[in-house]
Image: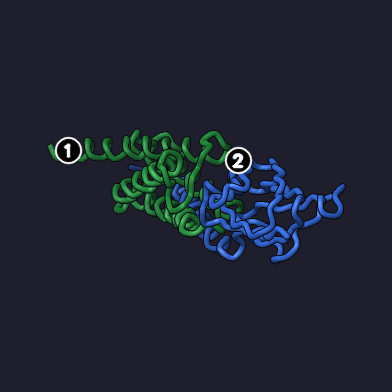
Chain colours: A green, B blue
Amino acid sequence: MTDDLTNSDRLWILGAFATLAVGAVHTQQFISDVGNAPTIAELFLLNGIGAGAIVIALTIPKLRLLAAIGGIGLSMGALISLAIARFGDNGIFDYKEPELLRGPVVIAILAEMTAVGLLYAYVVSDRDDASSSSA
Amino acid sequence: MNVDKRILTTLTALGALLIVLSLVAIPFKGTDAEPAASGEAQQGGGGGGGGGADAVSIKGFKYAPPQATVKAGSKVTFTNDDGAPHTATDTATGAFDTGTLNRGQSKAVTLQQPGTINYVCELHPFMKGTLTVE
């Protein structure tokens, strides 16, 4: 079924699954935990919706590169926000996260780092393919 | 770039499912975490009279009940029923501070001085509660 997949394809497909995990953990946390936290709740919800939209866009060849860049932005944004919540004096939007070793936080960090790594590698590989085919 | 249609279909379906679940979740946020109405703190077991144990639950990023009246000298037990860590801290007068409570942890504080105490969660200052000590 996947015999004719290129390395580039494998990267965006795995990146799409990692992005799904990023969105799923944010949606789950929105439902079970942060749904009543002002601003943070909306951001978690937008992360879930945005992740779903990015995954769908990744399946469309013409949108794939843009979606990959969007996926990197989504996960990087979540990682940076978490860092501010953990290490910022006032947290982010009045939200502090004192413990990075909570289950959902660990899953989110791993999924976000994986998504960033895979989608970045896809963007680089796509650019290399484009430059080699135009040479 | 010849990706199997089943992979594309699966990813599209999962992406759409995530969007739908996120939208469907909006009315359900915190539905299992509605705080009790304002009023007397819940009476705990073993207490009685002025030294009775009262309870405030922390759930859904809210104190339940958000306002409570207790007798001077009584103990108030704060229990974190949230996944996220919280505190209950009187930042104005320093009458009490539970410190960080993780999920399932409790801390009892004794309130001696009559008056009104406004407290917050130091980690999430939008969470506010009031204790009236009679």
| Residue placed furthest toward the left | A135
Density class for disc 2 (Cα within 10 Å; few <14, some 14-19, many ≥20) is some
Q: Residue at x 44, y 37 (%)?
A: A2
Residue B35 in view (yes/no): no
Labels 2 and 1 share a subunit:
no
Q: Residue at x 72, y 44 (%)?
A: B108
User: How far across and down, in percent of the image, does residue A55 sit?
Assistant: 42, 50
- The amino acid on which the numbered mark 1 sits, given as a three-letter code, is Ser
Q: Is residue B73 left or right of residue A35?
A: right
Q: Give the chain letter at badge 1.
A: A
Q: Residue at x 32, y 38 (%)?
A: A120
Task: Pick the quarter of the image with the N terminus of chain B.
Answer: top left
The image shows a total of numbered marks equal to 2
Q: Which residue is mark 2?
A: B99
Density class for disc 1 (Cα within 10 Å; few <14, some 14-19, many ≥20) is few
- Label 1 sits on a secondary structure element that is helix
User: How far across and down, in percent of the image, does residue A10 sit?
Assistant: 39, 36
- Label 2 sits on a secondary structure element that is loop
Q: Residue at x 44, y 44 (%)?
A: A85
Q: Which mark is residue A118?
A: none
| Residue placed furthest toward the front | B113
- The amino acid on which the numbered mark 2 sits, given as a three-letter code, is Gly
Instruction: Check the image and report above or below for B129 versus A90.
Output: below
Q: Which residue is mark 1?
A: A131
Task: Pick whichever, B53 or A126, lies toward us.
Answer: B53
Q: Is residue B129 left or right of residue A106?
A: right
Task: Pick the quarter of the image with the C terminus of chain B.
Answer: bottom right
